[in-house]
Image: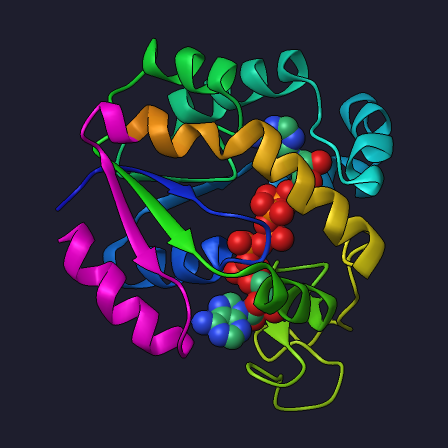
Amino acid sequence: MKSTIVLLGPPGSGKGTQGEKLCSEFGYVKLSTGDMLREAVKNQTELGKKAKEYMDAGALVPNDLIIGLMKEKIKEANGKVILDGFPRTIEQADALSGQLEVDLALNLDVADEELVKRITMRRSCPDCGAVYHLLWNAPKADGVCDKCGAKLYQRDDDTEATVLNRLKTYREKTLPLVEYYGKKGKLVTVEGVGSIDEIYEKVKKIVQ
Ligand code: AP5
């Protein structure tokens, strides 16, 4: 069983969805920089105030704000860990390699057209972080989280215009990590199209 997994893939490729399933079944701790940043924005912390404008524009939050934060969280986790949304630049990957060995970089490959459909119809829970899709993974009751009963919302960066910027940012800044982990012999790419459960079956085989 792999103990340190980096989830790679463009926005909407299913990193959060597959990561949650691995955590439920195998007891990983999932560290999601996106979730941490949204929490900071919600609580209006100094980090949240600085991060919001970058997130709303579909840009990356500067490395100096992210790297220190993640180093702390990784130290606290101290066990089987899934990194969702980190690293996202070569500089972040180099910082990570100074702290712990990555066993697997799992890259979810999904075409842009599908990504836009997934993201613009995503609904998220503000309290427990559960993620739904209006058509393909709908909550049982309209607009209400199955897990905790909170009212679902649409992320500020899930509009079509921002999604297109996020895809551009992904190509420029994050896609080079596919080659980075490929050269280290850590990369496995999974075709991320199909039902959530079909993809999870493939993911599980790679992780075990
Ligand atoms: P972050 O929250 O990490 O966003 P992201 O990488 O753009 O990824 P998403 O959360 O949009 O998608 P996902 O791949 O997790 O897909 P999901 O499983 O939800 O980051 C947000 C922002 O924070 C960034 O833009 C940046 O500004 C900042 N940031 C974060 N980390 C940073 C870092 N390290 N450095 C600098 N800045 C950083 O699935 C998407 C939808 O599709 C859902 O509705 C889901 O139900 C549905 N779905 C999933 N799988 C399937 C399937 N197989 N079939 C049909 N529907 C599916």
In the image, residue 86 sits, relative to residue 70, either above or below, namely: below
Instruction: Where is residue 57? Give x, y as percent.
Output: 84, 38
> In the picture, residue 201 is in which quadrant?
bottom left
Judged from this view, the residue extending furthest toward the bottom is 141
Q: Residue at x 24, y 24 (%)?
A: 183
Instruction: Where is residue 40? Give x, y as percent.
Output: 74, 35
Instruction: Where is residue 93? Give x, y as percent.
Output: 42, 20
> In the picture, residue 75 is in which quadrant?
top left
Q: Which residues are magenta?
A: 182-208
In the image, residue 38 sits, relative to residue 18, either above or below, namely: above
> In the picture, residue 49 is in which quadrant?
top right
In the image, residue 17 sits, relative to residue 36, either above or below, namely: below
Residue 197 on the magenta span: yes
Instruction: Where is residue 46? Give x, y as percent.
Output: 82, 21
In the image, residue 99 sits, relative to residue 142, either above or below, namely: above
**Closest to the observer, 91 or 149:** 91
Q: Residue at x 66, y 71 (%)?
A: 117
